Amino acid sequence: MRVNLNIEGQESVTWQQWLDIAAAVEDAGLEGLFRSDHYQSVQSRTERSSLDAWSTLAALGHATSTIRLGTMVTPTSFRHPSVLCKDVVTADHVSGGRVELGLGAGWHELEHTTYGFPFEELGHRYEVFEEQLEIIVRQMTEDRFDFRGEHYRLEGCEARPKPVQSPRVPIILGGRAGPRAARLAARWADEYNTTFPSPDAVRERKANIDRACEEAGRDPLVFSMMTGCILGANDDEVEDRARRLMALSGRDGDAGHWLDGLRDEWIIGTPEQAADRLADYADAGLSRVFLQNQLHDDLEVVALIGEVARLVAGSVRQRC
């Protein structure tokens, strides 16, 4: 299983912290560093700072040498597809071919209102999402094309340069693997990501995606998850980090009780406990994970995730 770190960039992550996190991810031997693409906090209505996702990733591409970089996920409502594609391809060149595009229809209404982005009803957002997917893929792979949709029109588009990666930058779609999402993923995506699932939910959602791929005449997609993690070298460290995260998000109550309510969907515990839990997900069909560390100033967590990655690799090999 490939293990990546996911950071909620809208929760006041400074540029120096991004540099420190990226260095820690490389030192820990993780596959990649991914970030959310939000303009406003999702933990608090109080405005927190957020550096632009694709500007950050392009800069990190220059500051790093080994790790994959990408978004989990970019909403289609922030950028015209031609602008987004140019941002992604630029980051791919800066990084030497190490970026991935996670793309979604958008969901956080408050940030759209705050920053003046239209927030349409879900069906409309999915129509825009589908057109953006086609435009982005065609700009990365075709020499010249026209596009005439309900929301975008391109005439004689010759997007250059093409990405460093061939045939294009990998595209990650995600959600709960409903019929429409599965159909879009089977047509356009390289990977399907689902969030905060149980192992049983992974089995069910992966089956939906596999079925859609079979109907589309293609091999199954990489199936991954993004979920929260609270790790520690021992139980006391785990509870201490839980209390810090509760305070950060304005929660009250007993940390142990709060942790118990998360264990079905989060990765919680010591590295050994986390590795055992991820091995269960591997048995369910998961091949990649993005572990969300919301205590972004705690670099010891990154080292612990690196230890988890090494342990889970050994555990999966033993089960095979």
Image: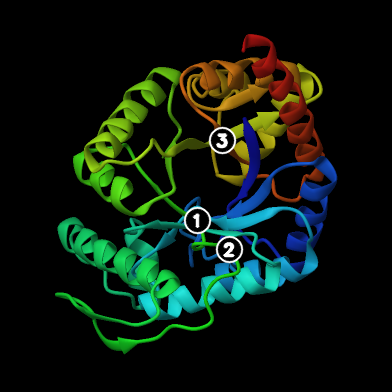
Q: How many marks?
A: 3
Mark earlier in primary sequence (1, 3)? 1
Expressed as whole percent of the image width and height from the top left, the position of residue 85 reads: 45, 74
Expressed as whole percent of the image width and height from the top left, the position of residue 257 reads: 55, 18
Residue 259 vertical position relative to residue 216 in the rendered view, above or below = above
Say which of marks 1 and 3 sits in front. Answer: 1
Q: Quadrant of the C terminus?
A: top right
Q: Residues within 10 Å of mark 1 (few under 14, many from 20)?
A: some
Q: Mark on residue 170? A: 1
Q: Secondary structure at mark 1?
A: loop
* Relative to 167, 275 lies left or right: right
Q: Quadrant of the N terminus?
A: top right
- Farthest-out residue, top: 319
Q: Which residue is mark 2?
A: 165
Name which quarter of the figure residue 51 lies in: bottom right
The residue positioned 81% from the left and 23% from the top of the image is 233
* Relative to 21, 230 lies left or right: left
Name which quarter of the figure residue 82 lies in: bottom left
- Identify the amino acid type marked 1: Pro
Q: Secondary structure at mark 2?
A: loop
Check contact, mark 2 vs mark 1: CB within 8 A. Answer: yes
Q: Which residue is mark 3?
A: 288
Say which of marks 2 and 1 sits in front. Answer: 2
- Identify the amino acid type marked 2: Gln
Mark earlier in primary sequence (2, 3)? 2
Distance between mark 1 and mark 3 Cα atoms: 14 Å
The residue positioned 47% from the left and 23% from the top of the image is 285
